[in-house]
Image (tube, rainbow, N blue to C red):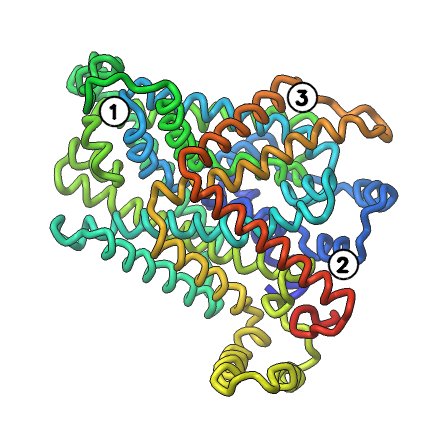
Amino acid sequence: MSGDAATSQTLKEAAAAAASTTIEIENDEAHDRLLQRSPSTQSRRSSTSSNSLEADIEEAKDPRKGSLTYLNCVAIVVSLQIGSGIFSTPSEISKHVSSPIIGISVWIVAGILVWTGAASFIELGRRIPHNGGVQEYLRRCYGDAYGFLFSFGYIAIGKPCSVAIISGIFAEHLNSIILPETWRTEWLNKLVALLGAVVITVVNCWGTNTGASAANAFFLLKVVGLFSIVVIGLVIGVSGKGNDLTAWIPDKVAQETDEPVALWVLVGEYTTAMFGALFTYGGWETANYVAGDMKNPMRDLPRVINSAMVIVMVGFVLANVALYIVVPMEALRERKIVAVTFGIQVFGTLGGIAYSLLVAISCLGALNSSIFAMGRLIVVASERRYLPSFFGDPEHESKEEETFHYKNYLRGWPSPIVSSVMMLIQKTETLRWDHKVPVYALLLNALLSSIYIVFGTFSFLLTFIGIAEYIFLFFAILGLFILRRKPEIGEPIPRTWNINPIVFCVCSAFIVLRGVITDPLQGLALLVFNLLGLGLRTFIVGADQKGDVELLNVPSR
């Protein structure tokens, strides 16, 4: 979008979709679209360095009259969490557990963990009543550098990894329909995933995006798929036609070796399984964004969070129970397309095709929403001076002025680079200026996502995104104890039980550390990313202070 007016229009459309009780938001892409509720306010606050207590109070004094009821908000928060991941992550989790009962336990433990986090976020939202979510919480608790690192990590790791995962799920389900099994190689899946991400990016570059009604349809597809698995699986289980339940006991599962497995190794396996479940539960951290549109947020927000968590936990746990009832454990471990495997087991080939189409289409909707939102998020980050303004909206007075500026800046650069950059600027100027499409932001996201698609594996990406995300969530919720030490102005703010932030911080710290120990290369990669982020921030801040790097930050009109 371009500027405040266009962004406001996008947000009004998102609010209208929310009011219709269902909204298509894929895990992490839901976070993005709601995060943009007031980017212009965020930009102005960041650019003027308005961190004073007085400014915070004034901003908090302007509450909007909400229109969403309790049921509206429950529907929205549930939609934030139900994504395409539920149709593939059960396979990854099954690879790291010894029996179905332990696999189901992983889902329950992960659900309880995110519930404690969501309960803590309720208090954080009350203490910092501003849009921005985790980024704003980190900025208020630890300083702007932490807010920047979260934004950088979300743009460089979180969203591109998520796009890569969804693209991979789409490719595997599509290939299961159109290709014989002997042709379905890993690299062919990557190629189809890459094509899917590129096509959706091109569609968004042409200014075409899914409307609210289509978004609701994509969400409905996922709910229908999940609900059908639960009902059919439980009916088969009750009828006694499912798998032998005695095989659910750990010591009844055939082991590859008779050697006892060390406890520390088992913990590592279960931690890796946890990352799969946590990715699927993703979206809980965005629940605070509905508070601004609630009729009675102080009363309803805790009720909404608790109700939504019960619905999602029960749905995910029952879905996995149904899968284990119908599909043998070994089959789940071998094939990531668990919904297709379920359909084949119950209905034969036609059932597999039906579930393949259902998941593939819902993945396309998820990709569209995610890529659409990511483009806008990068624009917001550039407005806050978290990224070079090159990725934001055009900030010159005219197309001619923009062309003159970049020709001037690139003077002295190698001729092929100058020609390529100027051709890109001129070829995209109509889209950027007339149709307000964030082309450069979309291309940046496509490039990063493509790297993860080509070089990442499903297991690697799940763990990588989990470690990266939960590092920031750990510090955000730890900041609750910092905020509690500050004097409160006005009425006392209700506190969540101390056990909630304590359990979340202890557990998230443990799984992050164990994840890094299990795969040190991922920890090293995250360290490198953070150092790059700090370097980029130093460069941009230095450019702002000197005012001599116009390519980075052109003064706003």
Q: How crowded is mark 1: few (under 14 residues within 10 Å), some or many (20 or more)?
A: many
- Front residue (pair 395, 344): 395
Q: Mark 2 points at which residue?
A: 47
Rendered view: 206 above or below 79: below
- Residue at 74 percent of width and 30 percent of height: 482
Rendered view: 231 above or below 219: above
293 relative position to 58: left or right:
left
Q: Quadrant of residue 221?
A: top left
Number of the front mark, 1 or 2: 2
The x and y percentages for residue 37 are 64, 50
- Name the element at disc 2: helix
Q: Mark 1 points at which residue?
A: 324
Q: Do the residues labelled 1 and 2 touch (CB within 8 Å)?
A: no
| Sequence-earlier tag: 1 or 2 | 2
Q: In which quarter of the image is residue 210?
A: bottom left
The x and y percentages for residue 122 are 65, 29
- Dot 1 amino acid type: Tyr
Q: Residues within 10 Å of mark 2 (few under 14, many from 20)?
A: few
| Sequence-earlier tag: 3 or 2 | 2
- Name the element at disc 1: helix
Residue 304 visible in the snapshot: no
The x and y percentages for residue 333 are 24, 33
Q: Residues within 10 Å of mark 3 (few under 14, many from 20)?
A: some
- Name the element at disc 3: loop
The x and y percentages for residue 152 are 58, 52
Instruction: Kindly report the distance in space between the C-alpha atoms of the residues bearing marks 3 and 2.
Output: 33 Å
Q: Name the residue under label 3.
A: 496
- Dot 2 amino acid type: Ser
Quarter of the rendering occupied by the N terminus: bottom right
